[in-house]
Amino acid sequence: MKKLFAILICTLLCVTLLSACGLFEHKHTYGDWISSEDGHFHPYTCGCPQQEVYLIHNYSEDGICELCGYEAQFIFKLNYEETGYELDRVGVGYQGGDVVIPAEYRGLPVVEIGYGAFKSEKKLTSVVIPDSIALISDDAFENQTSLTSVDVGKGVITIGVSAFEGCTSLKTVVMSDATENISAHAFDRCTSLESVTLGKNIKKIGGSAFEECTSLKVITIPASIEELGAWVFYNTNMTDIYFGVPAPGENWSENWNQYLDESVNIHWAEAKE
């Protein structure tokens, strides 16, 4: 009897250890979960040394976890290549104000801010865009009228159509050397915009990109520019435009300077011999 009891005890211990080591499925209740700082993962430490099992939230469409009730600030979507996540939209936990977009979600980088992701009545005042982001999609921050400044991050290659259109409090925009494409109407109607810093690798600025930026007086466009769209500076109060090229390029719209006031000083780079 003692031998049988010992075997039973040993078996139970082995099952417990194997389960703790991840060889059996963990079945946790709400009480087993520990909230991590960003709320996306709830780590549970099992009996094995230095081993941690991450339990993932199961979000509903509005960003409420169906397992624990956590209200997500952002809702993410795995991209087609399954190499990273898109910040698809804000969830019920989003409150506007000062926002920091995470660089990683569920072990993969966050590489894109999706179409219209921040179309919300809850207004942004500032946003930190991580270096992992390569694309700010169309309409991503449209009409965020309380947003005052944007540093687009060191990884952003493309700023989509109307990405910041109607951000009427936006005063400063800083782009890194990674940024190559500014799409049409990207900063249209940013009436408070006073300062735009372009990286040295900008290749394309789309039509009406800075239309109705009535506070923008001076801009420097680097020698990397290959394409300039129509009416880029339509209905602005520009005083000086500095170009890093000696003349318009062959891929520039013939209407790039249409409606630009004659008083605007256009500064061209000296032609290289």
Image (cartoon, rainbow, N blue to C red):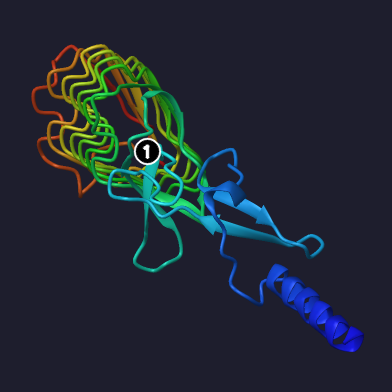
Image coordinates for residue 229, horizontal then vertical, percent = 17, 40
Secondary element at tag 1: loop
Q: Nearer the viewer, residue 273 or 151?
A: 151
- Looking at the image, can residue 253 be seen? yes
- On-image quarter of the C terminus: top left
Q: Residue at x 13, y 37 (%)?
A: 230
Give the side of residue 126 with respect to residue 28, left or right.
Answer: left
Q: Residues within 10 Å of mark 1 (few under 14, many from 20)?
A: few
- On-image quarter of the N terminus: bottom right
- Looking at the image, can residue 224 be seen? no
Give the side of residue 147 with respect to residue 7, left or right.
Answer: left
In terms of image quadrants, where is residue 234? top left
Identify residue type, mark 1: Ala
Give the side of residue 174 with respect to residue 162, left or right.
Answer: right
Q: Residue at x 15, y 29 (%)?
A: 257
Image coordinates for residue 2, horizontal then vertical, percent = 91, 84
Q: Is residue 39 above or below residue 170?
A: below
Q: Is residue 179 above or below residue 15?
A: above
Q: Is residue 54 above or below residue 30?
A: below
Q: Nearer the viewer, residue 8 or 35?
A: 8
Q: Residue at x 53, y 49 (%)?
A: 30
In the displayed image of the protein, which residue is found farthest to the front? Answer: 1
Image coordinates for residue 85, horizontal then vertical, percent = 42, 55
Q: Nearer the viewer, residue 256 or 17?
A: 17
Name the residue carrying label 1: 271
Q: How many marks?
A: 1
Q: Nearer the viewer, residue 32 or 42?
A: 32
Q: Is residue 117 above or below residue 28?
A: above
Give the side of residue 94 with respect to residue 209, left or right.
Answer: right
In the displayed image of the protein, which residue is found farthest to the right? Answer: 2
Q: Residue at x 58, y 42 (%)?
A: 35
Image coordinates for residue 184, horizontal then vertical, percent = 19, 39
